[in-house]
Image (cartoon, rainbow, N blue to C red):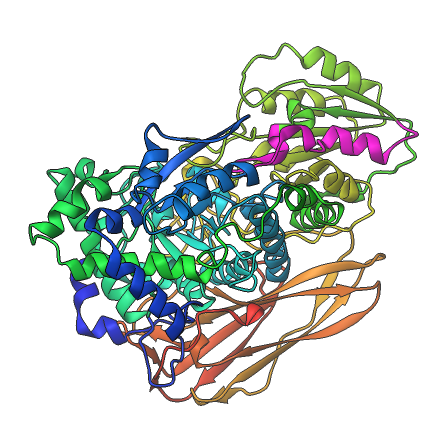
Amino acid sequence: MLAMSLFHHEALLRAVGPLLLVACSSASGQGAAPAAAGSSPAASGRVDELLAQMTLDEKAGQLTQWGAQVTPTGPLVQQGGEDDIRQGRVGSILGAFGVEGTRRLQKLAAEESRLKVPLLFAYDVIHGFRTVFPVPLGEAAAFDPALAERCARAAAVEAAAHGLHWTYAPMVDIGRDPRWGRVVEGAGEDPYLGAALAAARVRGFRGQPGTATSLLATAKHFVAYGGAEGGRDYDTVDVSDRALREVFLPPFRAAVEAGVDSIMPAFNEIAGTPMHAHSGILRDTLREAWGFDGLLVSDYTGIMELKAHGIAATDADAAARALNATVDIDMISGLYIEQLPALVASGKLAVAQLDAAVRRVLVAKQQLGLFDDPYRGTSVEHEKANELAPEVRALAREAGRESIVLLKNDRHLLPLSKSMATLAVIGALADDEAAALGTWYGAGRADDAVTVLDGVRLALPNTKVVYAPGASPETVAAGGFDEAERAAKAADAVLLVIGEGGDMTGEARSRSSVALPGAQLSLFERLHELGKPLVVVLVNGRALAIPEIAERAGAILEVWHLGHEMGNSVADVVFGDVNPSGKLPVTFPRTTGQVPLYYNHKQTGRPPREKERYTSKYVDVPWTPQYPFGFGLSYTTFGYEKPQLSAASLAPSEALTVSVRVKNTGERAGTEVVQLYLRDDAATFTRPVRTLRGFRRVTLAPGRSEDVKFTLDADDFALLDESFARVVEPGTFTVFVGGSSDTTNEASFEVTTGATLQGPGSAIPREVR
């Protein structure tokens, strides 16, 4: 059965998956989206009064978003935009920030328009605003939702001080194909980790709703945008109903439970219907089944693109299909302001549909307090006080350190000694501010960034640091190899910084190959031949295939694009002031030909067996990844005892406690991310080989141990039956606890009877409840 027909099926409206894929309203309100601030009787009265006074043009104007460009003299809206604001034909602005400029534009709406309805100012505050934090994929490597919430909160405070109300973040798409450039904006390949970070980031951006530092948060891109064929951005998605519910929807459901204010439909289609027109998913599932009553904002010209998709013949058709799907705001294309008044006047669209969308926009403005103070107390002085504040930069440095993953450390090459006479830092990315910032860096400025070279020099005031670019990711030329070789020969050790430039991942940055770009591999091979201690620092926004480096390098650090404090964060780890604790949120393949490659895959009837020909594997490369999901080393070591279970068998209504003793078996303090995975050994429908169901960060001194406990219950044991209702089936389960997704440290238990679960449960993982 097609996905669209299932989304209209009555059973879907009550169906919930193991991670709460669909939640229905209940008398208790369990699982329902939090009510919007501003939905009180007094607030509703103000909204009703405004709505009753609006013309059709003014109503369509509230659903129209124009773009702006920030210039040295302030934000400039598109031609004619200021007149449109005065006439009430614009409800929000994308791209304008800065107190002087936003106050000037707000004055046009709040003081000079007929009804004086204020504007919303929106911006992509993805991983920081003026202070840039690690890219979201890098931050996910910390496995630390509390840290993600703190970073989002700090970004929101800065952005609000610069006149912004609304961020188009977090991106909560699951990304299993590193060729897709936008994998850098999400939390990686796992729905459980993705849901935890979605909820945390939503809470951070929102803060205390109604206060001057709160931003409207947007979960995007709804839904399955990360499943694009071939990893090509904007391409079609062909996904099963089961995978949609089990893999792609959980982070969005967690965002809704956390109170997300808006959701952005994706550019892709599902089962023949582009998301901007998908009534079955947007209206029936998101709004009716999940109870979401916030804003649906189109992606950039997404409504207009319904014509290119081939499901709308005219602009009017596109506008009508989007509004019928309950998309409230038309970003940039102008189709709503051009088409909706006539469509309603002619009876082709019901005025009630238009009013419902306008009401949601007005409620959001009320929630922000804009009717009481359109300027939210902003001032130039407050703006300046919230630019790169020392405590925010310190948070960025902390986040950068936690995001770094140690992939290899032969013979304890790292940490490097601070007392060495000469260190060679090689690679164009070592002195590249843009590479530090990565993609979607808000209002961050490159000249505020600490590069890796800067950070090394600050950390080694008494060491001669010799720098040579050697090679860049953008060129295959080998012209700098000789200089790099001379620098390496004269040094005690070599720090080779290679990977991707800041503009090589992100939107419209899909790659056909995830091998190391440019001549960087050749540079590595040349330096490796010298026999010097060689540390590779990987700078990138996606999983890379680096088999030669994985085999030959003495040590490898995955550092991502860490933001303004990148150099200091890297130096803290390289020289041992901080022990690395990051874990991979994505699987690293050996070669591009293995992708998509992810840990929680389904088992086959012929699982891979090394010496058996007719099993699922390759003939030219191992089927296993280079580095699995959840992998990450430390400067110390950790030992795990066998998991201890509170019961060998239990009923579905009972909870299971899993306890494991973790010991620091090395010689220095360190933090381990303890991970719990679960497998349903035999079920009516095929299940993943294992799924993440819990994680804990544990810091231990040398020789110390701690008993780490996890709780599992029916929500963890459940699967979707043939009608997509949540059920627990009797049978055995295996639990795995260790330092990565390939741990073999396991124990088994039995669920004795089956059950059909009632109520939606919770989509938010325990780590952030």
Determine whether, in the image, residue 719 is placed left or right of residue 491.
left
| Spot occupied by residue 758 in the image (x, y as percentages of width and height) | 34, 84
Q: Please name the residue shown 52% across and 45% down the image.
A: 126
**Can you give x and y, in whole percent of width and height, for residue 252 in the image?**
40, 60
Q: Is residue 602 visible?
A: no
Q: Is residue 58 above or below residue 104?
A: below
Q: How many marks?
A: 0
Within the image, what quadrant is residue 318 found in?
Answer: top left
| Nearest the eye: 121 or 239 | 121
* Front-most of residues 361 and 731: 361
Is 16 rendered above or below residue 175? below
Image quadrant in which you'd find residue 754: bottom left
Q: Is residue 571 visible?
A: yes
Please determine whether, in this image, residue 91 is positioned above or below residue 195.
above
Q: Is residue 533 magenta?
A: no
**Range of the magenta residues?**
434-463
Residue 89 in picture, x, y percent from top left: 29, 43
Q: If the image is split into quadrants, where does the C terminus sit?
A: bottom right
Placement of 640 over or under 231, stated as above or below = below
Q: Quadrant of the N terminus?
A: bottom left
Please give left or right for residue 447 compared with residue 11 in the image: right
Is 246 placed left or right of 645 in the picture? left
**Residue 75 pos. (x, y %):** 48, 32
> Residue at 69% across / 27% down in the picture?
430
The front one of 154 and 713 is: 154
Q: Is residue 446 magenta?
A: yes
In which quarter of the view is residue 600 placed? bottom left
